[in-house]
Image (cartoon, rainbow, N blue to C red):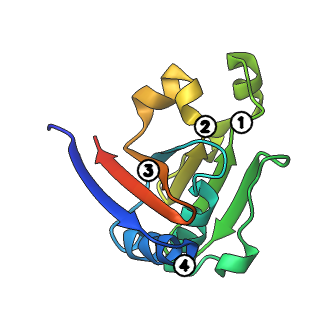
């Protein structure tokens, strides 16, 4: 099956959250989703919408797991794991997170900075790239493998 790609541009954080809510209705576990983008590109903002779309957490309760590395959000449809690998630099450090243990039939891993590791790039089901457009806009490209 060849990959499919879609693209949308949002004009504000609220629109990015709304896009994430809509995207949630198209997602079914198990999945590994890589979230790509520079610091401040809107990766966590998108996860806020996905978590709301799954009824796992309100947007204001979703925060970046930069220091805790993994946040878990539970919904009736799925377990969402929001993973931030920004501070993880080696395969050994990655292994200590035991991400494989999180993979379950009802789990979706939303992984920021996963492109740093070839294994995650190879194993991901969907890759979402966010790019800044002006002060508040974002171009969001989604590639399904």
Q: Are marks 4 and 1 in contact (CB under 8 Å)?
A: no
- Disc 3 or disc 2, which is closer to the eye? 2
- Disc 1 or disc 3, which is closer to the eye? 1
Picture quadrant where residue 22 is located: bottom left
Q: Residue at x 53, y 56 (%)?
A: 107
- Disc 4 or disc 1, which is closer to the eye? 4
Q: Which mark is residue 86?
A: 1
Q: Are marks 4 and 3 in contact (CB under 8 Å)?
A: no
Q: Residue at x 72, y 78 (%)?
A: 60
Measured Cα–Cα span from mark 4 to mark 1: 24 Å
Q: Earlier in the sequence, mark 3 or mark 2?
A: 3
Q: Position of residue 24 (x, y in %)?
A: 42, 70
Q: Which mark is residue 31?
A: 3
Measured Cα–Cα span from mark 4 to mark 3: 25 Å
- Disc 4 or disc 3, which is closer to the eye? 4
Q: Which mark is residue 120?
A: none
Q: Which mark is residue 14?
A: 4
Measured Cα–Cα span from mark 2 to mark 1: 6 Å
Q: Residues within 10 Å of mark 4 (few under 14, many from 20)?
A: some
Residue closest to the far front: 134
Q: Earlier in the sequence, mark 2 or mark 1?
A: 1
Q: Earlier in the sequence, mark 4 or mark 3?
A: 4
Nearest to the observer: residue 24 or residue 49 = 49
Residue closest to the far left: 1
Q: Are marks 2 and 1 in contact (CB under 8 Å)?
A: yes
């Amino acid at each position: 099956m060849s990959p499919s790609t879609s693209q949308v541009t949002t004009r504000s954080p609220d629109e990015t959250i709304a896009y994430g809510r809509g995207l949630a209705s198209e997602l079914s576990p198990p999945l590994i989703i890589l979230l790509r983008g520079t610091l401040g590109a809107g990766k966590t903002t998108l996860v806020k919408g996905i978590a709301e779309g799954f009824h796992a957490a309100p947007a204001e309760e979703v925060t970046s797991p930069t220091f805790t590395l993994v946040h878990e959000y539970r919904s009736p449809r799925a377990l969402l794991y929001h993973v931030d690998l920004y501070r993880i630099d080696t395969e050994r450090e990655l292994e200590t997170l035991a991400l494989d243990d999180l993979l379950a039939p009802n789990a979706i891993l939303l992984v920021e900075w996963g492109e740093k590791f070839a294994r995650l790039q190879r194993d991901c089901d969907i890759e979402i790239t966010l790019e800044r457009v002006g002060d508040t806009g974002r171009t969001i490209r989604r590639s399904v493998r």
